[in-house]
Image (cartoon, rainbow, N blue to C red):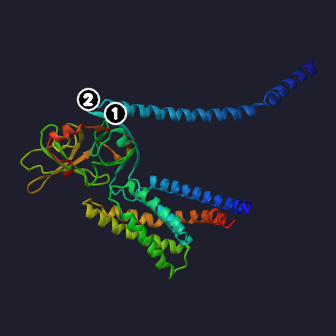
Amino acid sequence: MLPGIWIEDTLNTFWKRYIYLVHTEEENGMLKKRLAFLEEELAQRKEAVEQNKRLRSLLQLEMPQYTKIFAEVCAIRFGPLAIADTLLINKGSSDAIEMYSPVLVSTGLVGRVIRLAHTKAIVLPITAPDSKLAVITSEGRVSGIIVGNGGDKDLEMLYVPRSVSISVGEEIVTSGVDGVFPKGIPVGVVSSVEEEDLFHIIRVRPFIDIRSLEEVIVLNIPQSEISLLGVTKDVL
Amino acid sequence: MKKKQQKMKQPQAMSLLIQVVYWCFFIIVALFFQFFIPGVDIMLAGLLIIIPERKILQTILLFCIFIILQEATGILTFGLLLLEYSVLILSFFIGRTIFAVGTFSFVFLLSLFISFVYFVLIQIFGALQGIYVSPTSAMYDSILQALLVPLVWYPMQHLYGRYVRRGNTI
């Protein structure tokens, strides 16, 4: 019986170690390819979920009176002549975007369109040194003008007299008197208040991070509504 | 006779095709760099490749294409790059009398000079348009450009010599 058991064991081992494993390498290769494909698909799904979240948050913007145009940010400060941190977006005049149209995301104001082509537009962000917009504090209703300081620096709120009180942490929104931005769009939050001769020196931390923008909304404001305000857009 | 003419035309057409493919590839490379490194002008490297070739028509064509592409992406009014590229061509011909053309050191010096010209011009254009141009940011861009242009020029020049120039001699 012993030789029989030995033969059976040997045959079993031979089968399990060699014959059964003949296609293992091939199968292993196939499974690795499948794994790589599934990992790529998973990454794409995750990206789609994140994009979905961002788009949903953009949809939640409550501005039913204006036409919203979704746009993707193609590049930030592209080329040698993009001196400010300008954004290049993938929508232009063919998508009903107009010069000076406000651009925003769910968290707050991004800037305004300053150059327009048929299928592309360039946006000047609120952080650029040449950006100026009329704002108001959400609690004290103190109005002023916000200017950008370039790069990642905080914005500066000008022409707020020392006689009025303004506190750190107060939210700043657009006042709408500049004729470019509708009233009530969040801009930032007061990060510091210092006193000077006549006016406060107020620093405002913007709600948006220019470098991380991917999708934005461009508001199409009817010309009649802008002219009602009686302010020329070229002033800003 | 006709067959001979056809035979002559075939290599010419091939050479033209190679040149078109090369310049399309160059523009893609330049745009790729500009996408990831903001504020720099990589198209300068292309001009530094084509100017020594003495192909006037091609130089003018590329000059126009580069200007149109670059000027469209900025917020400054038209003209800065027209001046900058013109200064590049002029300084190339002046530099040719002193330095050996086509060497890395010559291109580096030219790139350094033209980046300085860019820095001066952007300040002037910004001031004329009432747009604030941060001198620190402009200087940083200029230095980066001065370093990057020769680095892009070197492999692209090598590719040009290997495939395009050789293709022309067929």
Give x and y (percent) for residue B145.
44, 64
Q: Is residue A20 above or below residue A99?
A: above
Left or right of residue B161, residue B135 in this image: left
Amino acid of disc 1: Leu
Front residue of A2 and A23: A23
Give x and y (percent) for residue B141.
39, 62
The residue pinned by badge 1 equals A58
Give the farthest residue toward the top.
Answer: A1
Please name the residue shown 70% across and 33% down the image. Answer: A28
Viewport quadrant of the N terminus of chain B: bottom right
Q: Residue A67 carries which label?
A: none
Q: Earlier in the sequence, mark 1 or mark 2?
A: 1
Q: Is residue A216 visible?
A: no
Q: Which chain carries label 2?
A: A
The residue pinned by badge 2 equals A64
Give x and y (percent) for residue B22.
58, 58
